[in-house]
Amino acid sequence: MAGSVSESIQIDADATLVYDLIADVSSVGSFSPEATGALGAGARLEVGDTFWGTNRRGPWIWATHCQVTRADRGAGFAFDVAFGPFPLSSWTYEIESIEGRCTVTETWVDRREGRRGQVISRAGSLLIPGPRDEHNQRNIRASLEGLKAAAEDRSTT
């Protein structure tokens, strides 16, 4: 079960601006094809903070419980995702600053393991049919393109 996918993009904007866009989980829906936002998220999330990530795919809407595992402004942001007591995934954003611009690498790691993980995977396939890694690879690519557009737009204003 445990798989992972990753994608990188170069963004012509400062790493702290890009970090602020990523870490503002309430407005992630502005550049993600599936994540729509977050409930219970503070303005500046720190390691250990939790929030409810909201998602939409077609007519389906759902929320997952998320806990911040990294909050390094300008360098990286990460959180683990669970559904009740069941771990689902980890999402990581590594930001490498390079002379006024940066490279962002977004990574998804599947944390659904063992028999419980198989049950959760089967249930999840009702929402997202097909291989989850391929689905998430497409979403990561689209999210990074949206992040790039948002960051570069804000960088020029």
Image (tube, rainbow, N blue to C red):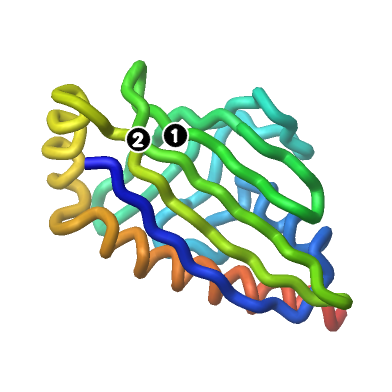
Q: Is residue 100 left or right of residue 3?
A: right
Farthest-out residue, top: 85
SS under mark 1: strand
Pinpoint residue 87: horizontal percent, then vertical percent: 36, 27
Which residue is tagged 2? Answer: 111
Say left or right for 51 vs 117. Answer: right
The image position of residue 121, as x and y in percent, is 18, 38
Local SS, label 2: loop
**Amino acid on which disc 1 is placed:** Val
In depth, the one of 39 and 86 nearer the eye is 86
- Percent x, y for residue 129? 14, 55
In the image: residue 134, left or right of residue 52: left
Q: In the rendered view, would you say 114 is above or below 73?
A: above
Residue 3 locus on image (x, y percent): 30, 49
Amino acid type indicated by mark 2: Arg
Q: Mark 2 near mark 1, Cβ–Cβ under 8 Å? A: yes
Q: Looking at the image, which is closer to me, 20 or 102?
A: 102
From the image, which quarter does the N terminus lie in?
Answer: top left
Q: Residues within 10 Å of mark 1 (few under 14, many from 20)?
A: many
Q: Nearer the viewer, residue 42 or 14?
A: 14
Local packing at callout 2 (Cα closer than 10 Å; few below 14, some 14-19, many 20+) is: some
Residue found 80% across the figure and 64% down from its top: 15
Q: Residue at x 70, y 50 (%)?
A: 76
Q: For the point 56% across and 29% down, which residue is it?
A: 67
Q: Which residue is mark 1?
A: 81
Residue 40's quadrant in the figure?
A: top right
Return the residue nearer the eye: 36 or 75: 75
Find residue 89 and name its label: none
Where, quadrant-wise, is the C terminus in this rendering?
bottom right
Vertical relation: 107 (above or below) 82: below
Which residue shows up at 56% across the image and 48% down it? 92
